[in-house]
Image (tube, helix red, strand yellow):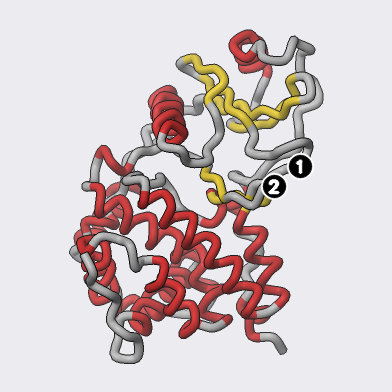
Amino acid sequence: MNPVRRGMRVQARKGLASAPAPLESSTPMLEPGDYAEFLRTTLPQQHKAVASHRLGSERVWLKKAGPPHGKLGYHLMAAVAGLLRLEVLTPVPNPGGEASIATEARRLRALGAAGLRVPAVLAQQPDGLLISDLGESGRPPVVLQERLDHAAAAGPVALLSAWREGLAAIATVHAHGAYLSQAFDRNLVLCPDGVIGYIDFEDDPGETLALAECQVRDWLSYLHSTAMLVRAASPQAAGAHWHAALADASDEVRERLALAARRMRWLRHLPAGRRWGRDTQRSRAVARLLARWYGHGMPAPPTTH
């Protein structure tokens, strides 16, 4: 039996919420480019938090402000970050509501201006945001999470090839002096032209963390969402790809990742059973990979800066 198939995840329920949804059918017919009017008239009719629509021949996405978020989850994550003595794991507040709409619009504009592939902000009002689709000529983008699952079914070589695309995409963001919000595989999308784009910016880690910590958080977020697949495939080869992707990162980022690896080592002993939840399984897989990659069996990362 293929070990990758054995470790392959069931599509994460949380991830499905970020994946493209079916197009809404009851959309008012407006002229292409009339984005502000489209947002104004469609927002009150949309019940979902996020939905895609057609405006002429163009596919657009409408994000609706939801209720403000509670703070209990942030307190729990803050306790975990304090226990591990890792500031990078400090939770980034996502207040929800109109504040999240404003944050996403601001971050999309900033990342787009930096030359990164993100949806364009087409129209904005306090309780709603209209953004472009990252597809092209009727061809939709593919969520990297789905691409990784399909690659895993083909075997370790295909999986590692797809996984490296995510690593390279994060390295590209950091090379621009930027960072993402939640760099999970479900928030990276492969566009029809082969370029990976970035979605979901309702929070801004830069409001809480320094740049290096934001970038370390990106690496750990991506690893958290993919560790179970990678560990079931070829963890040693994946470690070489990991360090290669980090070759151009700052010394501070690499040092903080090595520190995270040391302080997360005890998470290797978390229970493996599914009854403890997917996040527990993922955290255990991350700790085991980092222990392997930053232990005696893996060459030390370069320090060329």
Residue 54 is situated, as x and y percent measured from the top left of the image, at 75, 25
Write down the residue under mark 1: 139
Residue 285 is situated, as x and y percent measured from the top left of the image, at 45, 75
**Gap in angstroms between the C-alphas marked 1 and 2:** 6 Å
Q: Secondary structure at mark 1?
A: loop
Q: Secondary structure at mark 2?
A: loop
Residue 23 seen by the camera:
yes
Residue 190 is situated, as x and y percent measured from the top left of the image, at 62, 51
Residue 156, by quadrant, is bottom right
Confirm or deny contact between disc 1 and disc 2 (CB under 8 A): yes
Residue 97 seen by the camera:
no
Which label number is shown at residue 192?
Answer: 2
Say left or right for 148 vs 257: right
Which label number is shown at residue 77?
Answer: none
**Extreme-front residue of the structure:** 304
Say left or right for 57 vs 244: right
Q: In the rendered structure, which amino acid carries the disc numbered 1?
A: Arg
The residue positioned 69% from the left and 86% from the top of the image is 2
Decide: is 153 above or below 221: below
Front one among 28 and 93: 28
Say left or right for 114 vs 207: right
Residue 188 is situated, as x and y percent measured from the top left of the image, at 55, 51
Q: In the rendered structure, which amino acid carries the disc numbered 2?
A: Pro
The residue positioned 52% from the left and 60% from the top of the image is 166
